[in-house]
């Protein structure tokens, strides 16, 4: 009964490069959320996706950031032309969002992005 | 605007004592609250949740209390153990259509002294 999986766990990029972060939700979960965490701070919501749909991207910067959750395969958070300020831990969470049961979000181990 | 915050950034307790971590929220429309535990280098781990139609919920060694009158949430850990040392976050979710995002507080670091 695997939990939320994220890869890579650590990612180092130089300024201007692209970063791709992957998230596989828990089995049976069709809702994915991405959060960003800076050191010594709480998590900040970025985007909420269902299969093939972006439901809420209000927390995601308009430029350079994009997210997808295709019909097959993991959810991808893509950061183009990274800058040092993008250095952070990026967490993915998933939920079944069946309001008859629970909509608790379960988190993955995160990807720690370092921009040199 | 909406915010979730914590009264104390750090808490140090003796092993075996009870711990109480507090949280204030500002959105009276929030209907769901969760406590997460985050150990260094790891993702947040679900501890316990509570819906706004309840004022208390108990788990194994943990109890969450919700006071909607003053918009206050607390997490009580009984017989605190060294393995409880971590940062604890409260999070809230509003009752809003298709939005599912959680709003996190900044966290309280719990240190357990042996």
Image (cartoon, coloured by chain):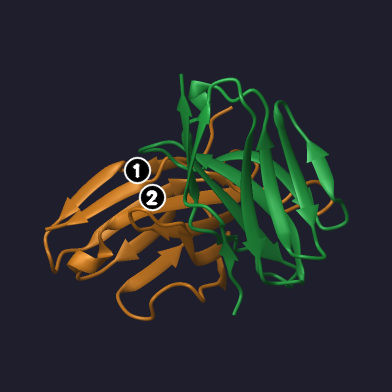
Chain colours: A orange, B green
Residue B84, placed above or below residue A16? above
Helix, strand or loop at label 2? It is strand
Report the side of B21 relative to B8 (left or right): right
Number of residues whose C-alpha sits closer than 10 Å to that of mark 2, classed few (under 14), some (14–19) or many (20 or more): many
Q: Which residue is at 54% across, 35% downward? A: A3
Q: Which residue is mark 2?
A: A22
Q: Which residue is at 41% across, 38% downward? A: B42
Residue closest to the eye, B80 or A94: B80
Q: Is residue A96 visible?
A: no
Q: Looking at this rendering, what residue extends furthest in the right direction? A: B53
Residue A7 is marked as 1
Report the side of A72 relative to B102 (left or right): left
Output the chain of dot 2: A
Q: Position of residue A36 (x, y in %)?
A: 40, 59
Report the side of B96 relative to B15 (left or right): right
Say if mark 2 contacts mark 1, CB within 8 Å.
yes
Residue B64, placed above or below residue A3? below
Q: Quadrant of the N terminus of chain B?
A: bottom right
């Amino acid at each position: 009964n695997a939990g939320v999986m994220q890869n890579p766990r650590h990612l180092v990029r130089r300024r201007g490069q692209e970063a791709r972060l992957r998230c596989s939700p828990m089995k049976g979960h069709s809702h994915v959320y991405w959060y960003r965490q800076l050191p010594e701070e709480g998590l900040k919501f970025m985007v909420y996706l269902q299969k093939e749909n972006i439901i809420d991207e209000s927390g995601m910067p308009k430029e350079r950031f994009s997210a997808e959750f295709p019909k097959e395969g993991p959810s991808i958070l893509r950061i183009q032309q990274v800058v040092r300020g993008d250095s952070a831990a990026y967490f993915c969470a998933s939920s079944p969002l069946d309001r008859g049961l629970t909509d608790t979000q379960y988190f993955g181990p995160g990807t720690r992005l370092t921009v040199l | 605007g909406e915010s979730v915050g914590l009264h104390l950034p750090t808490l140090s307790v003796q092993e075996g004592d009870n711990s109480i971590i507090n949280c204030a929220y500002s959105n009276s429309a929030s209907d769901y609250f969760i406590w997460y535990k985050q150990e260094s280098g790891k993702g947040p781990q679900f501890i316990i949740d509570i819906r706004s139609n309840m004022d208390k919920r108990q788990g194994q060694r943990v109890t969450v209390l919700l006071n909607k009158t003053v918009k206050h949430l607390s997490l009580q850990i009984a017989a605190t153990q060294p393995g409880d040392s971590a940062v604890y976050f409260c999070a809230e979710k509003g009752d809003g259509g298709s939005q599912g995002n959680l709003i996190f507080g900044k966290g309280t670091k719990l240190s357990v002294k042996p």
